[in-house]
Structure formats: C-alpha cells, structure tokens
Image (tube, rainbow, N blue to C red):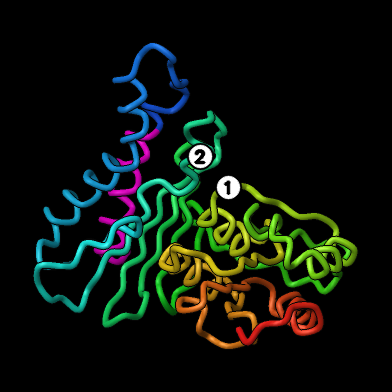
Amino acid sequence: MHPILNIAIYAVREAGKLINKNYGMLFSINNIEHNKNLLNVSHTSALLIKNIINKFYPKHIFFNIYQNDKPRFFSKIKWIVDPLNGFENFINNLPHFSISIAVQVNLKTEIAVIYDPIRNELFSAIRGKGAQLNGYRVRIKKHKNLAYSILSSTSDFIKNKHDCNFIKQLFLKYQSFRCTGSIALDLAYVAAGRFSAFFNMKSKIKKIFVGGELLIRESGGIVTDFIGGHDYLVSGNILAGNPYIVKEILLDIKNNLNLKN
C-alpha cells in the first residue's frame, strides 16, 4: 500500500474516533459550553488531521476546504481535507456523515480517502490502481435502465425554483432521488454502485468534489460539468456516474436548462 495512503487512512480513522465520541450529544438549552464543543467538532477534527500530516509529512501543504488559509511555504504535494462532511446531519443525530482527504501532486489528485465513521466504511483510491471499499474493489453500476436508476443531489439544487422544469423531467424519467446531506458520501456511493449518478449546480465549495472525483474515475465512471467538459471545479456544476446515465442527463440538461455551463 502507498505510504501516503496509509497515513491518510490513519488520519481519517483517528478523526472518526473523535467524531463518533461526540456523536449523539443533543443540543442543550441550558448548557452553552456543551453546544460550543459540539459545534467545534469539525474544527477539532481538522486540527487532529493536520497534526498527523505534519508529523509524517511536515513539508506537505494542509488545506481545509472550509478555510481560505494561504500556505506559508511551497510544496508540490497538497492534502485537501474535509474534516466533517455532513455537519448538519451530525448535529441532528442523523448517522450519515464522513471525513474526506484528497492528496494532490502538482494539482493532480493521486490519492483519495472518504471514511464513514458510523458504518466503518472506508472508500479509497489511488490513481491508476482502482477504487476500494474496505479493501475490496468497487465498480460503478453499468446498467442502462433509466427507470431503475437512483440519482443523488443536494436539497439546494432540488429547491431551486429556476430549475423546476428540469427537475420535473428528471423525476419523471428516473426511479428516485436521494438528498443525503453528505456530498462526499454521495460520490463514494456512486463509485461503489449504490447510486447511478450525482449532480449539483453552482456548489460554493468546489474542493468538496476532489476526493470523490478520483473514486468515481477509478471505479469506471466519468465526471463532467453541465456541458460535458471538465470545468466543474470552476463552475461548481458537477455531474458524475455511470457513463450512459451521465450522457442521458447531459441531454436533459441541454434541453431543459438555459446555461453556458
């Protein structure tokens, strides 16, 4: 196993222990300090991961996707970290959230890890070597039956009034939708064949996609923007999954959405 992957796995598992320890603690009306600790779990998780990375790779750059801290030095290797993806699920005791790490070398993602600490499911990928779930190879769904496809997106996209016609067409064409509250796990589920595709429009935090992107590519899927290009990290418009389903959705987008990307 790649040594950097080993450290990434160690880091997400340690962060997972921390998050699980705090999971299930409901907000208290009278205990302000308790609530503050609960809200700080994401920050604490990020700090734990950062310390682990600095211990083993002090010359690598750590980047928390929820912060805009500029690196103090140059390195061709960057660790892009989402310390708690699905935070609203976490604070509401919904057991569906994850920790995500993507390691980039010269701006190209080489290693990805997404960890679900509740289910103890570890999704991982190395560029050119496939994607795995708990050590077993995973592949995307290869079916072409649109009626039995499960798509995932975010509630922000589903609630967008300007896209009602497009959403209506998708609901009529595909079996069902999921809005799980964790984009990282949605992408991992596409890679593992649980969902057929994931799509989202104008995401504010683009780096949230980078780990899941590698997982999907290494499991046989494709990732595009809404015109079939590769600018999803710029536009925030992303479509990923089974190549056949992605092509069908691209046609739906072209026919129902008025956008350049």
Q: Quick one: label 2, few (<14), some, or many (20+) residues within 10 Å?
A: some
Task: Residue type at mark 2: give it.
Answer: Glu
Q: Is residue 244 left or right of residue 30?
A: right
10 Å crowding of disc 1: few (<14), some (14-19), many (20+): many
Residue wearing tag 1? 181
Magenta part of the chain: 1-19
Tell me if residue 21 comes above or below residue 251 in the rendering: above
Residue beneath the point at 68% across and 66% down: 197
User: 220 above or below 125?
Assistant: below
Residue 122: percent from the left, percent from the top?
A: 46, 50
Q: Main secondary structure of the magenta part?
A: helix
- Three-letter code, disc 1: Gly
In primary-sequence order, the first of circles 1 and 2 is: 2
Verify CB contact (< 8 Å) between mark 1 and mark 2: yes
Query: Per the image, is 99 magenta?
Result: no
Instruction: Compare residues 167 and 106 and report the one nearer the observer.
Output: 167
SS at mark 2 in the image: helix
Q: Secondary structure at mark 1?
A: loop
Which residue carries the number 2 mark? 88
Where is residue 202, by image quadrant?
bottom right
Residue 166 sits above or below residue 7 on the image: below
| Residue at (76, 55) in percent of width and height | 177
Which residue reaches farthest top?
30
Please tell me which residue lies in front, 107 or 225. 225
